[in-house]
Amino acid sequence: MTRATESTLSGRSFLPAALEIALRCPARSDYIELRFTTSAGPWQWCFPEPQHRYADPSATTSIALAFGRYGAQAHLIRAGGLGPALPSSAALPLILADARILVERRLITPGSFPLSAKGPAA
């Protein structure tokens, strides 16, 4: 895998990510765990299993996984910035359909969360 450089969206640092594996979440049987690889290390996130897994990858080609008010959130990338947040169950089919994925660096780098933050959803 070729390592691309870091991107800046809405003043935040993002790394390109490749989907490594998708499997049943060990904590909840109705969730799917996705494991991503980045140049800064691996990152994983459990998504609610959607009712339908069909997605048109041409409809949305880029998704950013970012730290938000309530933990990790998936966002559409629009005009070089973070677009609207997606429900996790809507983001999962797009990711599985090979959408381009960026992961916010502070989700991957240990110790980069403020003390009041709970960290990424696992």
Image (cartoon, helix red, strand yellow):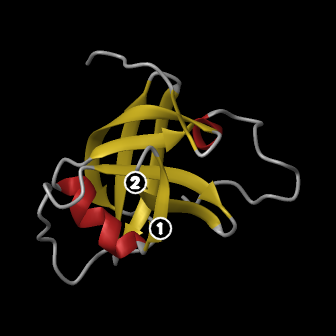
x 40%, y 54%: residue: 78
Q: Quadrant of the C terminus?
A: bottom right
Closest to the camera, between mark 2 and mark 1, is 2
Mark 2 to mark 1: distance in Å? Answer: 8 Å
Q: Which residue is mark 1?
A: 84
Quarter-of-image position of residue 92: bottom left
Residue name at image x 64 percent, y 61 percent: 68
Q: Nearer the viewer, residue 17 or 86?
A: 86
Name of the residue lying farthest toward the top: 2
Residue 6, can we see it?
yes
Residue 5: quadrant of the picture: top left
The three-letter code of the residue at mark 2 reads Arg
Vertical position of residue 41 compared to residue 44: above or below: above
Q: At numbered mark 2, what does the secondary structure look like: helix, strand or loop?
A: strand
Image spot of residue 98 (x, y percent): 18, 47
- When the figure is inspected, residue 5 is found, relative to residue 68, above or below; the finding is above
Q: Position of residue 84 (x, y in %)?
A: 47, 67
- What residue sits right under mark 2 in the picture? 78
Name the amino acid, label 1: Pro
Give the class, few, some or many, for how many residues have Cα within 10 Å of label 2's Cα (few <14, many ≥20).
few
Q: Are marks 2 and 1 in contact (CB under 8 Å)?
A: yes
| 88 lies above or below 102 | below
Describe the element under mark 1 as helix, strand or loop.
Answer: strand
Which residue shows up at 11% across the image and 63% down it?
A: 56
Q: Is residue 84 left or right of residue 17?
A: right
Position of the N terminus by quadrant: top left
Residue at x 43%, y 62% (from the top left corner): 46
* Residue 29 visible, this angle: no
Q: Which mark is residue 99?
A: none
Residue 41 drawn at (x, y percent): 50, 27
Residue 2: give x, y in percent of width and height. Answer: 28, 15
Relative to 13, is 63 on the left or the right? left
